[in-house]
Image (cartoon, rainbow, N blue to C red):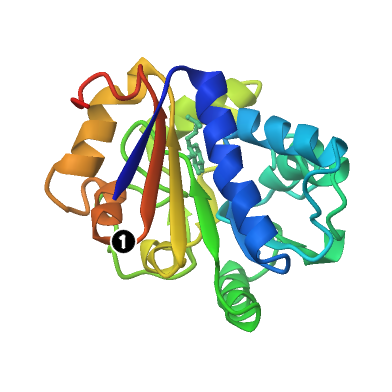
Amino acid sequence: MKIIRATDYRDMSRKAANFLSAQVILKENCVLGLATGSTVLGIYEQLIQWYNKGDIDFSAVSTVNLDEYAGLSSEDPNSYGYYMNTNLFRHINIDPRRCHLPDGTAADLTAECLHYEELIQQLGGIDMQLLGLGENGHIGFNEPHQSFAQMTHVVELSESTRAANARFFSSEEDVPKQAVTMGVKRIMQARRILLCVSGQRKARILKEVLFGPVIPAIPGSILQMHPRLTVVADADALAEIRG
Ligand code: GLP
């Protein structure tokens, strides 16, 4: 595990964007695993800036997102599909046909999970998976106490996750109760993982994730076992971890 210390959110975003951009430069047809949430917004802004300067070419890149809410289409402003289009895809020269998210509106979500797994296999697996961290230690939408062994699956969202994500919705009631997420096993199969964490409210959980016991109660703790994990975190998030 490599920990990169950033001074603040802006610095974290820039350093993390550097890793993603290096991946695209090293392998122009790479498969990037992408994430949503507020932590990664600055990373996408930075990538767009470098694209506009002519420094990165996304034309051969494929992407697979970690998760999507059940029942929301990419037209819905609260969906992760909408988030990705608005915050990254439409600003860069990526081919929309190569941008993939689970289809939260699929009539049979279990079949959609299998389909998403097949797609990732066909793409040859994920070269670099970007991850944020939930306040309860979740990665993607893998909630505490779920099996580490799962591939893409349907998940019931915990009350704490629904409350944490309610800020994006008009009310907590509107936050979907289910989502489709890549499972921990699928995430762990990525060739490289880039975990990005910012802010003091993640400091305690980040310490547990990186240095506590590897237990399903803290889904992110499994990342300790990944051979190529890079953590980019700002000083606030690293407040409980000595340099
Ligand atoms: C959501 C996403 C996660 C993300 C987490 C943290 O629950 N499904 O993939 O890591 O939020 O979000 P934030 O970066 O906004 O704290």
Residue at 58% over, 81% down: 121
Q: Residues within 10 Å of mark 1 (few under 14, many from 20)?
A: some
Comparing 51 with 219, the one in front is 51
In the rendered image, which quarter contains the C terminus?
Answer: top left
Q: Is residue 36 visible?
A: no
Q: Position of residue 41 (x, y in %)?
A: 63, 31
Image quarter of residue 187: bottom left
Dot 1 corresponds to which residue? Answer: 226
Q: Position of residue 126 (x, y in %)?
A: 55, 67
Residue farthest to the left, as pictured? 213
Against 117, is 139 above or below?
Answer: above
Against 57, is 183 above or below?
Answer: below
Three-letter amino acid code of the residue under disc 1? His
Image quarter of residue 55: top right
Image-based side of 223 in relation to 88, left or right? left
Comparing 13 with 173, the one in front is 13
Residue at 22% over, 54% down: 216
Residue at 33% over, 39% down: 3
